[in-house]
């Protein structure tokens, strides 16, 4: 392996690297969306792809999210592997009918005759001073949909490996990119085309006292909280869910069986959130292991505030620490 | 004021209501075998339709949308498509499906509530029927995009009802078809009704074909009950698409002679007089009359055809009724290519319930 194969990249650069790798290996992989070609995407996730692979494989679409979602479905039924970008998750709703009623159902509807090997990419979450409709975390809306995978990377390495896995996965994947950490850190990523497994949680840090469950940008605060707790002598196990749906319950339950306590952290609203599903799974599968109720640290059940108030909405390190102190005290 | 552009929408009809030519017939009228085959297909579709409704009325089929009145345009669509083309249907395209090789039994399975009814063997790339309105238009432009990317000389036909033209999916798709110069033919089956909403409340536009103009596409109107107008328009549009000349919109004017579905009662919103008038323009009767006038048809041939179609439908019904339900596990087995761990426990629960009859099935 040459030195050039290891790159120090941000999360968004890792997305770009994975796209470029797979497009070079597999000519059926194409990229489409608003502003993805000439402009390289508003976050530059697709920059350079048009120059390298041409307009036939990197396509600027008309401004119509429903059309982007549906066109990708037609392409997929012809054996292409479209990676379709929604500029922001807040704009994805126009495409929901296509994703839910068709992409997620094609294999089932045709009893395997046709399927939709599609990745729908969307930056999501708050924290970058964006206007309204740019900062929501509505992954729970999609986690409820049978036939659809919802994947959220939390680091450059996992963005690279999980996106490769998503593109190679024969079923539709909603790949939600936490834009708050698009450029927050750099990490050495080996650009060798190796994917990471989907449908599995990643244990980022081992501990015996409490299980912290999170995904996406909140991994940052959760790891910081684990550091703080360690200084207090509380060893937290930190689990990055990564594939929000279908959920890897086994890893979560094993961890809770070990620690006896769980705190779930997500920036989406609490009501009906993925955290509720995880808490219910723990209640069903590890109730007798629990030494305290499962606690959630989440966003509020309100509309994501405009940016002057977004930090007040987002879970903070101290919120997580206090939640852990609460469950440890029991 | 300077006039920037001028538009026109043409319309085509060749036969009067008695099946007599109104004008010189198009070149397609020289292909006698094709015409006879078309007639056979219209009769088969109508025979199938009547049986499917009867099955629903006797509790042996689910809610079913009748194709009554659409058989001619559907047949023209089916005939004009090459096997290598892709058909993107809406939910009332039985006549076209038959010509694409969809088994009658499969159509009964689909409307009878069995997903295997869309596992078509003979047209593996055709999109399945799906109930959401006009969403298939986006799939059609995706399929056509793939063909264009690969430089293929294939094309796509996408059907949508008159109500479907009010959806963003239709408008977004024709817009893309124009912008990307895609090999797709949109056929708007204007049967005058979107359930109970009449055509004049659906759009203020004088024609639905003129929506093509906004997308930079040619738009034509044909009498969808006139086989010659329909097949000429379809052949021409598909040849244009396969030849890299872009998309076309065809508004096929017809009439839904039945209810919207077996769950509907059209007498609530449609007059008997309007229906009687529509029956006078029936495309099957018109084509049959043309064949008689041309010396290509006779009573004994009609009798034989009716018997042949009845036998084919009866055979399909027997096969349908004898088809064992899928194992209940099928409801999770086709969600993903392989079963995620989180679904394994649920699959085991389905197996357990099936084994004990606790899922409501008779053991």
Image: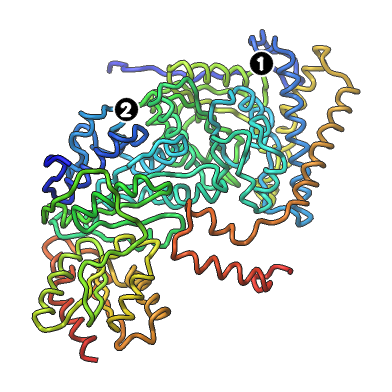
Q: Identify which residue is drawn at 61% across, 44% down.
A: B118
On screen, B223 above or below A287?
above
User: To which quarter of the image does residue A24 belong?
Assistant: top left
Picture coordinates of residue B329, whole percent (x, y): 59, 61
Picture coordinates of residue B127, whole percent (x, y): 54, 38
Q: Identify which residue is drawn at 51% across, 40% down.
A: B164
The disc label shown at residue B14, or none = 1
What is the quadrant of the N terminus of chain A in the image? top left
Q: Using a 10 Å C-alpha cutoff, classify the residue at mark 1 as few (fewer than 14 neighbours), some (14 to 19) or many (20 or more).
A: many
Q: Is residue A247 left or right of residue A227?
A: right
On screen, A157 above or below A17?
below
Direction front: furthest residue: A1
The disc label shown at residue B147, or none = none
Q: Secondary structure at mark 1?
A: loop
User: To which quarter of the image does residue B253 belong?
Assistant: top right
On screen, B324 above or below B67?
below
The disc label shown at residue A56, or none = 2
What is the quadrant of the C terminus of chain A in the image? bottom left
Q: Using a 10 Å C-alpha cutoff, classify the residue at mark 2 as few (fewer than 14 neighbours), some (14 to 19) or many (20 or more).
A: some
């Amino acid at each position: 392996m040459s030195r050039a194969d290891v790159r120090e990249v941000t999360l968004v650069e890792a997305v770009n690297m994975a796209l470029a790798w797979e497009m070079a290996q597999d000519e059926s992989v194409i990229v489409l969306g608003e502003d993805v070609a000439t402009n390289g995407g508003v976050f530059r996730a697709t920059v350079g792809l048009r120059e390298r692979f041409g307009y036939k494989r990197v396509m600027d679409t008309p401004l119509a999210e429903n059309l982007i979602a549906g066109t990708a479905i037609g392409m997929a039924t012809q054996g292409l592997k479209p990676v379709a970008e929604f500029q922001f998750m807040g704009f994805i709703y126009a495409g929901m009918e296509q994703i839910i009623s068709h992409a997620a159902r094609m294999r089932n509807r045709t009893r395997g005759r046709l399927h939709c090997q599609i990745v729908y990419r969307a930056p999501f979450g708050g924290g970058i001073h964006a206007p309204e409709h740019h900062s929501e975390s509505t992954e729970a809306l999609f986690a409820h949909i049978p036939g659809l995978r919802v994947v959220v990377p939390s680091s450059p390495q996992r963005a690279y490996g999980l996106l490769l896995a998503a593109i190679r996965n024969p079923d539709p994947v909603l790949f939600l990119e936490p834009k708050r950490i698009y450029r927050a850190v750099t990490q050495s990523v080996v650009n060798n085309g190796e994917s990471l497994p989907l449908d599995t949680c990643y244990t980022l840090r081992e501990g015996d006292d409490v299980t912290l469950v999170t995904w996406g940008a909140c991994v940052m605060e959760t790891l910081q909280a684990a550091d703080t707790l360690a200084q207090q002598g509380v060893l937290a196990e930190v689990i990055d869910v990564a594939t929000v749906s279908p959920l890897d319950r086994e890893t979560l339950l094993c961890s809770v069986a070990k620690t006896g306590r769980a705190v779930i952290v997500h920036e989406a609203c609490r009501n009906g959130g993925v955290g509720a599903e995880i808490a219910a799974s723990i209640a069903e599968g590890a109730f007798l292991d629990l030494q305290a109720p499962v606690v959630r640290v989440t966003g509020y059940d309100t509309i994501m505030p405009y940016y002057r108030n977004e930090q007040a909405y987002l879970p903070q390190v101290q919120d997580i620490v206090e939640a852990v102190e609460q469950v440890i005290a029991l | 004021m300077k006039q920037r552009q001028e538009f026109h929408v043409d319309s085509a009809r060749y036969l009067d209501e008695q099946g007599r030519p109104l004008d010189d017939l198009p070149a397609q009228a020289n292909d006698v075998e094709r015409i006879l085959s078309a007639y056979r297909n219209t009769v088969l579709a109508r025979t199938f339709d009547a049986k499917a409704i009867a099955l629903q009325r006797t509790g042996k089929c689910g809610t079913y949308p009748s194709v009554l009145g659409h058989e001619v345009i559907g047949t023209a669509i089916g005939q004009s498509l090459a096997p290598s083309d892709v058909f993107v249907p809406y939910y009332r395209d039985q006549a076209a499906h038959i010509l694409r090789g969809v088994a009658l039994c499969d159509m009964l399975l689909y409307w009878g509530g069995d997903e295997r009814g869309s596992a078509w063997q003979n047209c593996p790339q055709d999109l399945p029927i799906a109930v959401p309105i006009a969403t298939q238009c986006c799939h059609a432009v995706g399929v056509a995009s793939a063909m264009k990317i690969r430089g293929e000389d294939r094309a796509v036909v996408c059907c949508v009802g008159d109500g479907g033209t009010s959806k963003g999916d239709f408008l977004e798709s024709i817009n893309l078809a124009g912008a990307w110069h895609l090999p797709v033919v949109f056929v708007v089956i204007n049967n005058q009704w979107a359930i109970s909403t009449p055509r004049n409340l659906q759009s203020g536009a004088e024609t639905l074909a003129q929506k093509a103009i906004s997308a930079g596409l040619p738009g034509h109107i044909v009498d969808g009950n006139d086989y010659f107008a329909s097949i000429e328009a379809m052949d021409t549009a598909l040849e244009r698409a396969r030849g890299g000349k872009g998309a076309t919109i065809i508004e096929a004017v017809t009439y839904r002679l039945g209810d919207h579905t077996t769950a509907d009662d059209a007498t609530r919103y449609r007059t008997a007089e309007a229906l009687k008038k529509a029956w006078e323009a029936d495309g099957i009767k018109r084509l049959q009359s043309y064949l008689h006038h041309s010396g290509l048809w006779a009573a004994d041939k009609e009798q034989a055809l009716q018997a042949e179609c009845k036998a084919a439908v009866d055979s399909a019904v027997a096969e349908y009724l004898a088809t064992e339900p899928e194992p209940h596990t099928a409801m999770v087995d086709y969600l993903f290519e392989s079963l995620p761990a989180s679904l394994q426990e649920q699959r085991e629960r389905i197996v357990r319930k099936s084994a004990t009859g606790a899922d409501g099935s008779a053991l």
